[in-house]
Amino acid sequence: MQGSSSAPRYLALDVGSKRIGVAVSDELGLTAQPVLTLERRRNAREDLRSLARLARRFGVAGIVVGNPLHLSGEVSPRAAKTQAFAAELGELAGLPIHLWDERLTTREAHQILYEAGKARQEHRRVVDQVAATLILQSFLDEKRGTGSRGGTGPCG
């Protein structure tokens, strides 16, 4: 929406087996902000419902999901699970899902926290949010034509 004061907002997720990091873009679509770390529940449906509620709360136009491919670019078992989770979320929330290459974002997030002087034991609480923020910032930069990493396109 050129010329408009607000761009479509996006929710980004770094989906792990124990936690899901969540970030959201600002109203201008320029920066990614960390939101929270969702502790996974036994029932994945509850996680999906919580994330769909967050998407409604922030009024997002789409959801960016970190796609944990192998370094070679091949689909890992974790990526297959994440893609299935993302497709279910897209259906439940009624929003487009954008799978985004997230290789090395968790390592990058740990490095950022380390450089910020955070103790290693504090990392677990926020590293997933930081990773989600990095995923979303990469997506936003690519949409504006300033990014260097590519996504794997919409899914579902």
Image (spheres, rainbow, N blue to C red):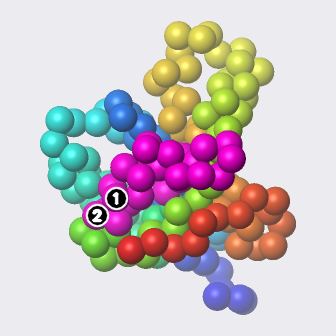
Q: Per the image, is 81 magenta? A: yes
Residue tagged 1 = 84
Taking the magenta stretch, the answer to whether it contains residue 66 is yes
Question: Does the residue at mark 2 contact the one at mark 1 (Cβ under 8 Å)?
Answer: yes
Q: Residues within 10 Å of mark 1 (few under 14, many from 20)?
A: few
The answer to whether residue 2 is visible is: yes
Left or right: 82 in relation to 102: left
Residue located beneath label 2 in the image: 88
Disc 2 to disc 1, C-alpha distance: 6 Å
Q: In the displayed structure, does residue 132 sit left or right of residue 118? A: left
Disc 1 marks a residue whose amino acid type is Ala
Nearest-to-viewer mark from 2 and 1: 1
> Measuring 71% from the left and 63% from the top, which residue is drawn there?
150
For the N terminus, the image quarter is bottom right
Task: Identify the residue shown where x is 17% and y is 35%.
Answer: 42
Q: How many marks overall?
A: 2
Q: Which residues are magenta?
A: 65-89
Q: Secondary structure at mark 2?
A: helix
Q: Amino acid at mark 2?
A: Glu
Q: Is residue 29 left or right of residue 63?
A: right
In the rendering, at what x and y percent does residue 58 appear? 41, 63
Residue 24, percent from left and from top: 52, 56
Question: Closest to the observer: 32 or 48?
Answer: 48
Quadrant holding the C terminus: bottom left
Indicate the position of residue 115 as horizontal and vertical percent values.
77, 21
Query: Is residue 40 placed above or below 28 in the rendered structure?
Result: above
Q: Picture quarter containing residue 101?
A: bottom right
Report crowding for label 2: few under 14, some 14 to 19, many 20 or more residues within 10 A (C-alpha). some
Query: In the image, is residue 62 above or below residue 77?
Result: below
